[in-house]
Image (cartoon, helix red, strand yellow):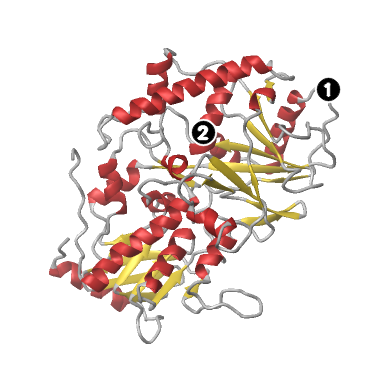
Amino acid sequence: MKHSTATVLALLAVVAQYPSHAAPADPKVIIIGAGMSGISAGNRLSEAGITDFVILEATDRMGGRIHKTEFAGVNVEMGANWVEGVNGDEMNPIWNMANGTGGLNLRTFRSDFNHLSSNTYKQDGGLYDKKCVEKVIKRMDEVEESGSKLSGTLHHSGQQDMSVMSMQRLTSQMPDGPSTPVDMVVDYYQHDFQFAEPPRVTSLQNTQPLPTFNDFGDDVYFVADQRGYESVVHHVAEQYLKTDPESGAIVDPRLKLNTVVREIAYSPIGVVVRTEDDKVYRADYVIVSASLGVLQTDLIRFEPQLPSWKSMSIYKFNMAVYTKIFLKFPKRFWPEGPGTEFFLYASGRRGYYPVWQQLEKQYPGSNVLLVTITDDESRRIEQQSDEQTMEEAMEVLRKMFPEKDVPEATEILVPRWWSNRFFKGTFSNWPIGVSRYEFDLIRAPVGTVYFTGEHTSEKYNGYVHGAYLAGIDSANILINCAKKNMCTYNVKGKHD
């Protein structure tokens, strides 16, 4: 992309407005964000011999949407919790670090969802008949299988894509999709629980079959290690950032925490990044690993504005919201033992406190339940008090277990990813209406500005391994330009 003389002069004018707080020798690259993608990109740059960079992180920690916090005496995960895609033909790179040759040996537990038919609760209490739920699950599985076959017949450009709900209507002869409470909760478990948005907006072609499970295996492992899932991000960072030999903490001066980027001025002569405290950093290139949700807000202003093709691609994808609510109780009242880890609440209100998990295996003696909500329910709950949320959850539990003495919860943890200006959601979802063409645009650089994040992963958007691999891919694109003078990024035509 060519810039006019006026654009270059405008960039110089921006530079002149602020005193420089950069190192005496300006870095070659600025990386914005110290989540998995930003840290992964830094590691790849280092491997290629590009070590003169700085990482500007808005929060006080590394990890991004992988974040542990103390709750009820144990560390739990507010964001990403599972390593998804394990025990297949290919090795998931995150699993390799967490429990393979990477050496972290995180405490993980394989999640077993095979007993949901025995653990689906009616809206007003009591269990559904197991055979009734098995019939619903079998029918849903058949629809999914038909959907995967249909998806394979569509042109790879995405021009023939449809929503998952359209596929359901087409293959199961349900004009309105799943409508009974048990139909809806099984449908929710199979789709929303995975993608954080309902089938009516989710792309069929990008989710069926799902590349993560096709490539890496069908198993998923719940991380319940007191070091936190974020230790995987630290593991990558330790490959190239200086650590304190005694504490193991990252002490590399290239990592700058609590540094909120508000403006990126760019042109062929380089980039100037201004932070919220009016510090200025200059470099040849910048890699932006902010979440899709942040890119859809005005937190970071680009000068000049991003071209319309870039902005349109950013706004066409969805930033979903996935909320894991933790509740602590003085005693256990839920079923225990093999086959009882997960249970469903079949409300007539789709997505209302639907998927529950008891965590006695992961956190023995903690008396903690986890309930997952998504999408509009997540946004609604983020705007009310924790006390209101606890009241709603308790009402649901007492309906599920009317014969039990259900005590009041003593603690609650409600993450608010959507309300947080540094995230604005949990992960991206590929909606109907976009194609491979828009995806190529969303990860394409704009001059000296490069983009990374799970939303730029070619096959694994929404996953931790997608974020990790996207950091490598985006760094490679920059390396080709900086070291090989191969700066043209080719995007196939919309109908190719």
Residue that appears at 38% across and 31% down: 204
Query: Dot 2, how many residues are within 10 Å of its Cα: few (below 14), some (14-19), or many (20+)?
Result: many
Q: Callout 2: helix, strand or loop?
A: helix
Q: Which mark is residue 367?
A: none
Q: How many marks?
A: 2
Where residue 149 sits: x, y (%)? 36, 26
* Three-letter amino acid code of the residue under disc 2: Asp
Report the side of 62 relative to 332 (left or right).
left
Task: Kindly tell me whether residue 31 is visible in this rendering.
Answer: yes
Q: Is residue 16 above or below residue 419?
A: below
Mark found first going from the N terminus, 2 or 1: 2
Q: Picture quarter containing residue 210?
A: top left
- Residue 194 picture location, percent across and down: 51, 37
Q: CA distance from mark 2 to mark 1?
A: 30 Å
The N terminus - image quarter: bottom left
Label drawn at residue 403? 1
- Residue at 27% in and 36% down: 156
Residue tagged by mark 2?
A: 192
Q: Amino acid at mark 1?
A: Glu
Q: Residue furthest front?
A: 89
Q: Indicate the secondary structure of the residue bearing disc 1.
A: loop
Q: Is label 2 in contact with label 1 (beta carbons under 8 Å)?
A: no
Above or below 38: residue 240: below
